[in-house]
Amino acid sequence: MTRRRRNARFALTGFVLVSLLVFGSLAWASWVSLRSQRAEQVALQRERHRTDLALALRRMEARVQSTLTRETSRSPYEYSPLYYPPLLWDNTGLPIEAGQYSVVSPLVDQPLEEWLLLHFQVSPDQEWTSPQVPSDDLVALVGVDLPPKAVIDRAAIVLSTLKQSVSPRELGERLAEGRARDLANAPWSAPEDALAAAAAQPGAAGSQSPGRQAPAQQAETSEYQRRQRQTLETRQQSRAPEACDPSELAASNLLLPEPVWPGEDQIGTLCVTPSDVTPVWLDLVGLDGPFLAFVRTVPIEIPGVFVYQGFLVDWPLLRSALLEDIADLFPDADLAPVHDGPVDDLDTLMTWLPARLVTQHSVTTPSLAAWSPRHSGLLLAWLAAATVLAAVGLGVRSLLALAERRTQFAYAVSHELRTPLTTFRLYTDMLTTGLVPAESRDDYLKTLNEESQRLAQLVEGVLEYSRLEHHSANIAIIQTTVGALLAQAEERFGQQCTERDHHLIVDANGLADRACRTDPELTLQILGILVDNACKYAAGADDPRIIVSAADDRAGRFRIAVRDFGPGVPPNEQRAIFRPFSRGRSSADASGIGLGLALARRWAQLLGGRLELVSPGDRQPGACFQLVINP
C-alpha cells in the first residue's frame, strides 16, 4: 500500500510540475503576445496620426499653392501702379524706345483672394507704395479702370498702418530672420542666392542652423523633406524670368519706385532677377495679429541698393480657412506661427507658410484586457492546453487506477483462491491416502463441493466483470410485474438466508401488480448480491431479519430496497465499497474479492437504473441498498 501511494504521489507531483511548466510558458507567451499587440496598436495609432497629418498638410498646401505660386512669379514691374515695359515693338516690327510708353499694373484692378490684403513696395528712399493705392496722376488718366473707392480706401488704410508699424530697416531685419528660420529648418534645400542674401541682410549674422544634417547624413527622407522639395521645385519653375539682358540696365528704364512721368532724373532702374519670396511675421498697430507678409529684395543698378517688394496676408482669415479644410481630420487643430528655427517636429511644419500644425493628439495605450482576435486565439490555446492536460491527467489517473485494480485483483484473487485450493489439495490427499474414515467421507465430499462452488462463483464474477469492462454484456428486457420479481427473489434466496441464520422478509407494499420492463434474471442477480452481502456482513446481529421491499415515487419509478440490521457501512467507506476489488475494513473476516457491489452497480446502469446506499433511518442499525428501476 505504501508503494502504491508513493507511486501515486510521484505521478501527481510530475503531473503538477508539467502543468505548471505548460501553463507558465503559455502565460509568458500570452503576456508577450498581448504586449506586442499593444505596441502594434500604439504604433498603428501613431502611423495613422502621421498619415492624417501629412494629408492635412497637403490639403492646406494645395489651398495656398496656386496663389503663392502666382505671386512668387509676379514680375517686379507690376508692384508699381504705372511702369515702363522694357521691350515693345510697333506694327512694323521695329523696337520702340524704352520710356515712350507706360503700362498700368494688373494689380491695380486685378481681383485677389480675400485673404490677400495688399501688395507693397519700399523704394531706396524708404517710400512705401502699393499698386492697390494709385496716385492722383494715375487716377486722372483716361481709360484706366480702377477698383471702387471703398476698396482703394481700405488698401490705403492698410498701407498706412503698415508704414506706421514697420520701418524699412525693421522689415529688412524680419526678412533676415525669416531667411535664417528657413535655413535652420532645411539648409540643404535652400537656394544659394538665399544663403548669400541672408548672410548679407541686417541681423543675418549667426543665423546658420547648427543642428541640421544634410540629406547624405540622414538615414531616410521625412515627409516634410518630400513636401519641401516639391514646394521648392514649384517655386523655382514659377520664378519670375529675366526680362532683359543685365548689360542693358544702364539704358533701360524698367520700374518706377513710385508713379511719376518721364524724367530721367526721377527714374530708378531695377534688376530683373529678384530674390526668392520669404514669409515674415509682422505686428500691425491697432490690428489683431500677427499678420503674414511675403517679402523679396530686388537689387537696382546702384551696387548694394535694393528695394523691398511683397504682399500682406490676413493671417487670421487664412488660418480659419485652412483649419476648415482639415476639420474632418483634426477638428480641434490649430496653426501656430513659427518665428524661429529649427522646429523639433518638421512633419508638422508647412512648406509654403511659416506655421506649424498643432493637433490635440494623444496616443491611447489600449488595455491588455481589451478583447481582440488575438485574445480569441490565446483563449483557444489555453483551452487546448487545458484540454490536453486534462486528458493527460485522466490518462494518468486511469493508468494509476488500472494499476491499483490489478494489484487489488491479484491480491484479492490470490487470497480467495488460496483457501479453496488449499482445501482441495488437503482433502483430496486425505481421501486418496485413506486417512479419512468411511463415516466422514460424505462430510469431506460436501466440503469439497462447497469449495468448488465458491471457486466457480469467484471465477464467474471475474469473467462477468471483464465482460462489463469490455461492454460485451447482453441483457433481455421483458415485461413483468413487481410481484413476480419479489416472488422469485423469495424463492431463490429464502433458503440461503435460513441456512445462514437469517430471516428473509419480502414486502411488495401493494405494488405486486405494478408492471415494469426489466431483465428479471439480471435484476435477481443484483438482489442476490445484496442479500448475500446482508447475510455476510450482518452475521451475528441481534435482529436476523433481511427485508426486501418495493416502493414507488412520484416520477413513476419503483424501487427495491434490501436492508439488514447489522453494523452498517462506516461513512468513510460508503463511496469506496462500489469500487472494484475494494473491501471495507469491517469485511476483513468475510470472504470475497470485492467485486459484488461493483458488478451490481454496473448491472443497474445497464438496466437504465441505479444502485445506491441510503440511510436506513435516524439512529437505525444496519445498511440499506436501494435499486431504482425506470418503468
Image: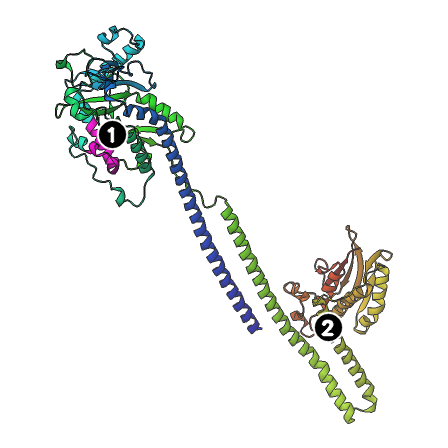
Q: Residues within 10 Å of mark 1 (few under 14, many from 20)?
A: some
| Residue under numbered circle 2 | 463
Q: Nearer the viewer, residue 524 or 235?
A: 235
Counting from the top left corner in percent of width and height, residue 56 is at 38, 31
In this image, 190 relative to 478: left or right?
A: left
Q: Residue at x 27, y 42 (%)?
A: 215
Up-down relation of residue 543 to residue 249 (above or below): below
> What secondary structure is the magenta-colored segment mainly?
helix
Q: Amino acid at mark 2?
A: Leu
Q: Residues within 10 Å of mark 2 (few under 14, many from 20)?
A: few
Q: Secondary structure at mark 1?
A: loop
Q: Which residues are magenta?
A: 175-195
Counting from the top left corner in percent of width and height, residue 357 is at 34, 31
Number of labels in the image equals: 2
The alpha-carbon separation of the residues under discs 2 and 1 comes to 101 Å
| Residue under numbered circle 1 | 339
Counting from the top left corner in percent of width and height, residue 277 is at 25, 27
> Which of the two discs, 2 and 1, labels the residue nearer the N terminus?
1
Q: Which of the numbered marks, if any, corresponds to residue 506?
A: none
- The image quadrant of residue 8 is bottom right
Q: Amino acid at mark 1?
A: His
Q: Nearer the viewer, residue 418 or 328?
A: 328
Specify whether residue 625 is in view: no
In this image, 38 relative to 617: left or right?
A: left
